[in-house]
Amino acid sequence: MLDLAARQHGVVATWQLVQDEVPSVQITRWAHRGWLVRLHRGVYAVGHRALTADGHHLAAVLACGPGSVLSHRSAADAWGLRATSRRNIDVTTAAAGGRKHRWIDAHRCALHPDERTVLRGIPITTVARTALDIGEVTTQRDVHRYLVAAEQQRRYDQRAIDAVVARAAGRRGLRPLLGALRDLHPQHVATRSEMEIRALELIAAHGLPAPRVNDELGPYLIDLHWPAHRVAVELDSRTYHLTADAFERDRRRDAELAAAGYRSARITWRQLTCEPAWVARTLGRLLA
């Protein structure tokens, strides 16, 4: 029990102890002696109530049963992207039982596997899924502030948000999330297809050889590929390359292409729209 509590911010659940084959009579005895301090029905602090915020968050998740995750305002707080002073803790669960716990706001929903993760040992909705969820319980302005904080902390992942939006048909939080996304990028963030169209128009206008688009090269999908020239160009939309994982993945790709004898470049939406002549000259030199 002590080892389990040490891994879980000082809290344990009855269902976990039962899984570890601890007799229920023993759990009752520990509770009577004060070794287990009740936090929620079936969830205890081990030895004391002096828990961190993470301890209280995990206790609420455990109270709602296996498969539950911290979500909505509480998840935004745990990610450090939107603080809350609410006493109630938001948990998303596939079961209905969590609704009966005091100080827990349980939201019943089946989450996609890509929308759940673990933060400091706490099962939690991803940053992208949390953006949708807080749109259901707060305002569009709050969602906008949350997304701004996510960008500032380099937790913003446009691909993950796009996937959440694609699965969110009919959800209350979709409209405020889409509104916040429009507010966040008022200059119009180009989609991948829009960048491809603009790049191909520029290439044709300057008489450059036509590339293959979205061409497979080993494990990579190359946006613009000139195999005869051994040139690969990435259309580098800022919103798709903000995360640490994306940064590392992009650098690995560039290094492997260079090792294979490729010349590569990255072209941004701003360069395509504001410096087309420079882009054309750069591509011309690469293809020469």
Image (cartoon, grey):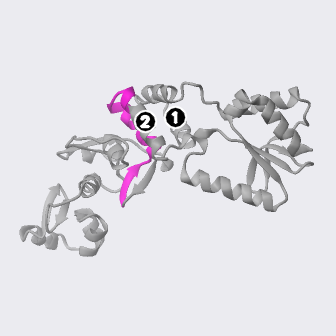
In contact (CB < 8 Å): disc 1 and disc 2: yes
* Picture residue at 55% right of the left edge, 53% below the top: 244
In which image quadrant can residue 278 be found? Answer: top right
Mark 2, other Cα within 10 Å: few <14 / some 14–19 / many ≥20: many
Queried whether the magenta region covers residue 126, the answer comes back as: yes
Queried whether the magenta region covers residue 230, the answer comes back as: no
Which percent across, then down, holds residue 171? 43, 30
Region in magenta: 121-142
Which percent across, then down, holds residue 28? 12, 68
Q: Of the numbered discs in the image, which one, if any, rests on residue 165?
A: 1
In which image quadrant can residue 238 be found? Answer: top right
76 sits to left or right of 187? left
Mark 1, other Cα within 10 Å: few <14 / some 14–19 / many ≥20: many
101 sits to left or right of 165? left
> What residue does disc 2 label?
132
Q: Is mark 2 on a helix, strand or loop?
A: helix
* Picture residue at 28% right of the left edge, 66% below the top: 16
Q: Is mark 1 on a helix, strand or loop?
A: helix
In which image quadrant can residue 175 be found? Answer: top left
Which percent across, then down, holds residue 89? 25, 45
Q: Is residue 1 visible?
A: no
* Picture residue at 38% right of the left edge, 48% below the top: 79
57 over 237 or under it: above or below = below
Precedes in sequence: disc 1 or disc 2? 2
What's under tag 1, amino acid-wise? Answer: Val
Q: Can residue 264 be seen in this view?
A: yes
